[in-house]
Image (cartoon, rainbow, N blue to C red):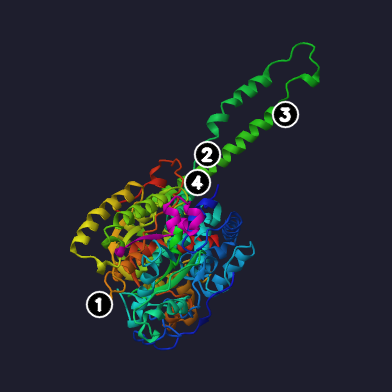
Amino acid sequence: MPEPIAETLAVWLRDVVATVPDTDTIKAFLESVALGAKCSEPQVLDVVALAHRVASKEKVEWFADLARSKNAPIPAVGNEALVTRLAAASTVRLATSGGNAAIIAGLATQSAAFLGLAPDLPEVATFADDAIVKAGDAVRTRALSYEPTAPKVPGWVDQALVPPAEGTPPSERPDWETTAIAVAEQLDDLAVEIRKRLALLDEEYNLLWWSHAGRSLTADAAWGDVAPPARRVALVGHELAKQTRIPATAMVDGLAAVALGDLTAKHLDLADVVVAARAENVALAAAEHLLLPISTAVAQAKIYNEDDTWKKVVKTVHGIDVGKKEPAVAIARQLIREQHLGKLL
Amino acid sequence: MSDPGVPVEPPDDVVEAPQAGEPAPEVVAAPASDEGWVGLGGAQSLTWEEADFVAARHGATIVLVAGNQESGKTTLLLQLWAQFLRGSFAGYRFAGSETLDAFDDRHYPCRVDSGNRYPLTEHTTDTDTRFLHLCVADATGKRQALLMTDLWGDLFKDIAIGAKVAERVPVASKADKTMVIIDGEDIVDHTRREAALRNAKLLIGAFASEGGLRLDAPLMLLLSKSDVLNADDKDWYEAKVTNLVEFAEASGFTAVEKHRVAARPPDADPEGLEGVLEWMCAREERLPVIEPERTPRSGRVFTTGRMGVW
C-alpha cells in the first residue's frame, strides 16, 4: 500500500492541526494527499516545491483547493503550514507510487536539495532517494524468462512428433499449429528480452568506454583540455545524460568525477555553468521552475541574450540564486537531473 | 470553525515594545518575520477548534500546563507573556498572539493601574479545553507558535484521584510538551509538602497510562513560587524531585527535566522564566515516522555500486 497510511498521516499532522482529527477528517486529509499525488506530471514540481515551503501563494491556494475538494478542513487564510505538510505527504505518496511520477518527484526533490532547500518532513528526502534507486534498478532489471520456459520447447515438439496411433481420426491427431504458435511466442519473448539486455549492455559499455577514453565527444578533446572549468562541467553533464538511461544510477557521480578530474570538488559559479550550458546547447527542460534552476536560467539567458538581466529575473521571478557556488560534480549531476526531467515532463 | 484572528498589514517599521504597565499594544510587529502578517489578538483564550487555525498557519507546539488550583499555572503563562512588554526575552521576540486581549485581561489585576494593593491572578474555572497563544520569533526571524493550555486546576485533581486523563483533559494525547507544576507554597508547608509530591506522582502515573500523554513528549517538573522556599526547603525538595524524575523515567517518559521558577516574586524580578520559554521553544528533532521498504537489490556493480569517493 502506498504511503502514507492514515496512522502515518495522523502523526505528521500533529503540529499543524491542534485538535485530534476524527476518522472522517483523517480520511479527508488522506484523500487530499492521494489527490495531490495524482496531479499531472508538470504539477508534480509544484507539489514538491510546496513540500519544501517555496511555492508561491497561488500554488498554496491551488493545493488548498484540491484538499477542500475532498472536504479537508483547510482554513481560508493562514493555512500555509497545513498545506505544506499535506504537500509533503503527497510527495512521499508520489515517491512510493512507481512510474514516471515517482521519478519526477524523486529528481525534483533532489533538485531542491541541490538548492539547499529542506523538506517539511524528513521522509520526503529519504523516500525520494529511494524512489530513484528503485526506479534505476527496475529500468535495468534483466528479465529471465528463458530459463523457466525454453526447456519446455523440446517437450512440446516431441509431443507433436509422436505418430498417431493407427485409426486415430484426423481431428485427434497432434496439433502442429498450436505448438508452432507457442514456440514462435517464446522466440518473440526472447527477442524482446535480448533487445532489452543489449540496451542495458550498451549503456554500460558506452559509459565504460566514455570514461576510459577520457575525452569529450562534443569537444573532441581530452577532458583536461576542455576549458574553462564551467564548460567542462556543462559537457560532462551533457554527455553523461545522453549515455544514461532514466534515472541515472549513483555510478554517474563517479564517472563525472573521473572526467572532471581535479575540478570535481572545486566550487564553481552556477551562473558560469549556465552560460556554458547555453553556449553548448545542452538539451535542458523546456519548463521554467524553481526546481529546474539551470534550465530556467538558460531559458532566461536566451531571452536577455548577452545582458546580465537574466540573473536578476531568475532571482526575482523564480527565487533562483545563480550566484551560488557549488562543487563541480554537484552541478554536473544537476545538469543530468534536469535533462532527464526535461524528457519526463 | 471561525477564524479568530483578523490579519493586518504590519507597519513599515518595527513598533517599539510597550513599557511595563501599559495596556497591550493594538498592533504588534513581528520583526524579521517570515511573512508580512501579524494576527490581532482576541479577548478570549482559544477553544480547541480555534487553535486549529493557529496551527494551520505556522504549525504550533501544544504545551499542557498541569497543576492543582492556585499552583501558579495561569500566573506563569501571564508572566511569560508580560516579559515581552519590555522587549525581547530569552533570545526571542514577540511575534504576535491570537489571545492578546485575553493575556491583557488576565494580567491587568497584576498591574499598578488596576488599583489592587497586591498583584492578583484570576483563577481559571472553565472546564473546556482553552489555549493562550504566544508566537515568538528567534534571532533568525523564524517563528514559533506556542499554544499553552489554560485549564481549571480541579481537572488535574480529579486525574490524581483516578479519573481518566482522556475524559478530563482530552488535549493530553496531543500535547507536544507537558509541565507538571508543583506549588512552592505547598513545599514550604511541612504539613502539605509530602501530599503535594504524592499528588504530582499520581498525576505523572496517570499521564503515563493509556490515553494519557505521549511518552516521547518532553515532560518538565516545574516548581512554582520558588522564591518562598528557604535553603532547607530547597534541599528537601531537590532530593524529592530527583526521585520524582526517576519515577517519571521509569514510567516511560523519555525526556524528563526539572526546573524551578519564581514568576512573580513580590520585590524582585522573575527568575527561571527564560528556562521555561527556552524549553517550550526547543525544537524536537523530527524523526522519520516511516522508512522506505527494503527490497532485494540486483547486486550488480553498475546499478548498486559507486565509484571512487562519490
**Residues under labels 1 and 2: Cα distance?**
79 Å
Which of discs 4 and 3 lies nearer the camera? The answer is: 4
The label on residue B27 is: none
Name the kind of residue labelled 2 in the image.
Answer: Ala
Name the kind of residue labelled 3 in the image.
Answer: Glu
- Tell me, yes or no, whether the two marked residues, 4 and 3, touch with CB atoms within 8 Å: no
**Residues under labels 4 and 2: Cα distance?**
10 Å
Where, by quadrant of the figure, is residue A267 drawn?
bottom left
Query: Which residue is nearer to you in this view: A40 or B161?
Result: B161
Residue with the mark numbered 4: A138
Identify the secondary structure beneath mark 4. Answer: helix
4 or 2: tag closer to the N-terminus? 4
**Residues under labels 3 and 1: Cα distance?**
103 Å
4 or 3: tag closer to the N-terminus? 4
How crowded pointer 4 is (Cα within 10 Å; few <14, some 14-19, many 20+) is rated as some
The correct choice, above or below, for B251 with respect to A164 in the image is below
The magenta stretch spans which residues? B156-185
How crowded pointer 3 is (Cα within 10 Å; few <14, some 14-19, many 20+) is rated as few
The correct choice, above or below, for B106 with respect to A169 in the image is below
Question: Do marks 3 and 1 share a subunit?
Answer: no
**Residues under labels 4 and 1: Cα distance?**
70 Å
Which of discs 3 and 1 lies nearer the camera? The answer is: 1
Residue with the mark numbered 1: B268
- Tell me, yes or no, whether the two marked residues, 4 and 1, touch with CB atoms within 8 Å: no
**Residues under labels 4 and 3: Cα distance?**
36 Å
Residue with the mark numbered 3: A177
2 or 3: tag closer to the N-terminus? 2
